[in-house]
Image: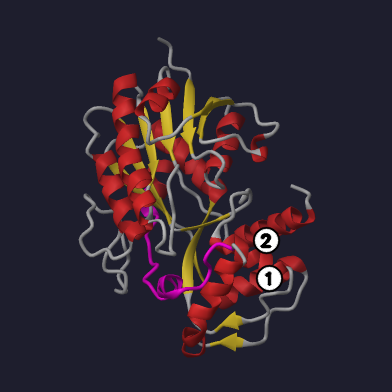
Amino acid sequence: MKKDFSVVTGGTGYVGLQLVKYLIAQGEKVKLLLLEDHPCLEGIDCEKHVGNICNPVDLDACFRGAKTVYHIAGVVDISGKKEELMWKVNVEGTKNVVESCKRCGVENLIYVSSIDTYPDKFSDEMKTELSSYSEVGLTSGYAITKALATQIVLDAKDELKVCCVQPTGVLGPDDYMGSSIGAMMDLFIKGLFPVSMNFGRYNFVDNRDMAHAMYQAAKQGRSGECYILGGEIVTVDELMGHMAQALGKKKPKIKISKKLIVPFVPLISGIMNLAKLPPMLNSFSLSKLEENCNFSNEKAKRELGFSPRPAAETIRDTVLWHQKKLRGEV
């Protein structure tokens, strides 16, 4: 059987959708495994297969004849309310994907892991790829499930080619599903986030640069290897400044300290929940802003040709996309 197409799980997320667009631009035939169709796929030349990664029968029907599977589908939760679902999807679902790839003779499996799989988050050392992943040293359900899933993929390296990419904080266009940072940008655009912070920073990567690296991982990545996809480290205040500049606004003058924010975190989280917004500010997200985000991307640059664009460009394009979304233009 000629293997002439790629499968993407999680193709409606803003990582998956950018990858789908990139693959099509490279002349690839693409099939999406979807829980359901979505308007964001309108006009995109791809085959759609409705199914669930938790159902091996759905996977076999979708993967049969595929050369490469890009496994992106997963559950991200920082609220603590979806622990059981994360285990079912992130761990058991990934195991199902691996086993289906073996049964269907898929040649390449590219898995989107996470830098949350790295323990010892408050040291200052530059972090590089690990040789194995486990729950040791991890505290959040998301980190643990992604670490276990990563190892499940790596353990299949002798039966098919497997590579894991590990993005830092992802930004970029096509956030139709609604991420936490995207929700914050929406509030900022509306003038409902008028303050900055005098603490916190994070490492960001553009979803468009991720798409290129994932494609290259399928082409020339080494089986059983992980590749950190990180970009620049940006402080919260710098992020606010870049967003303001993109929108032609003034940067917020008031900078709030962590000491001032902490007492109000439960109230803010409650308001976000009532407004049905993704959780933006809770004890977990505050902790993330103080973690070590020094991640080396040298391996991905060297082996995949990874070339992250400037953070200012990514932030500008992201916030302008959100502005268009709020206007109903995308």
Q: Position of residue 139 (x, y in %)?
A: 29, 66
Kind of residue indicated by mark 1? Phe
Residue at left offset 68%, top offset 70%: 188
The chief SS type of the magenta part is: loop
Judge left or right: residue 21 versus residue 91: right
Give the x, y percent position of residue 72: 44, 42
Q: Describe the element under mark 2 as helix, strand or loop.
A: helix
- Residue visible at 73% across and 74% down? 191
Closest to the observer, 163 or 111: 111
Where's the N terminus, which quadrant?
top left
Residue 70 seen in the figure: yes
Residue drawn at x 63%, y 51% is: 173
Which span of residues is magenta-colored? Answer: 277-299
Residue type indicated by callout 2: Val
Residue labelled with disc 2: 319
Q: Is residue 302 magenta?
A: no
Q: x and y percent of residue 92 in the render?
A: 31, 41
**Vertical placement of residue 51 versus 202, above or below:** above
Residue furthest out toward the top: 1
Disc 1 secondary structure class: helix
Q: How many marks?
A: 2
Of the pair 261 and 126, the residue shown nearer to us: 261
Q: Nearer the viewer, residue 71 or 230?
A: 71
